[in-house]
Image (cartoon, rainbow, N blue to C red):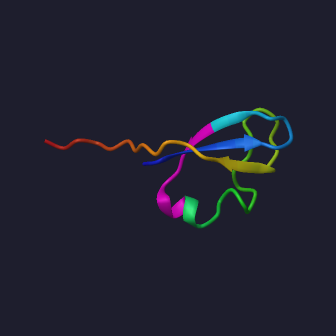
Amino acid sequence: MPYYEYLCQACQNKFSLVLTVAEHDKGQHDKGKIKCPKCGSSKLEQQWAAFYATTSKKS
């Protein structure tokens, strides 16, 4: 699953979240469902970050 980086506009805390593409595409951060882990604010700005995904290898 992809990682997304956010910056809290209230306390300037930068943090990463693992979201499915569907969760991100639904605009979860715009609806206030994602909150800053430091202050609890939902005033977040998505930051540009290098894309990387975690997958499970099946053998």
Residue furthest to the bottom: 26
Residue furthest to the right: 10
Question: Left or right: where does residue 37 sit relative to residue 57?
Answer: right
Q: Residue at x 60, y 46 (%)?
A: 48
Question: Left or right: where does residue 15 sit relative to residue 38?
Answer: left
28 above or below 35?
A: below
Number of numbered callouts drawn? 0
Q: Residue at x 64, y 64 (%)?
A: 27
In the rendered image, the quadrant that contains the C terminus is top left
Q: Residue at x 52, y 51 (%)?
A: 19
Question: Left or right: where does residue 8 sit relative to residue 58?
Answer: right
Location of residue 33 in the rendering, given as x and y in whole percent from the top left corner: 71, 55
Q: Quadrant of residue 16?
A: top right
Q: Which residues are magenta?
A: 16-23
Q: Nearer the viewer, residue 56 or 43?
A: 43
31 above or below 13?
A: below
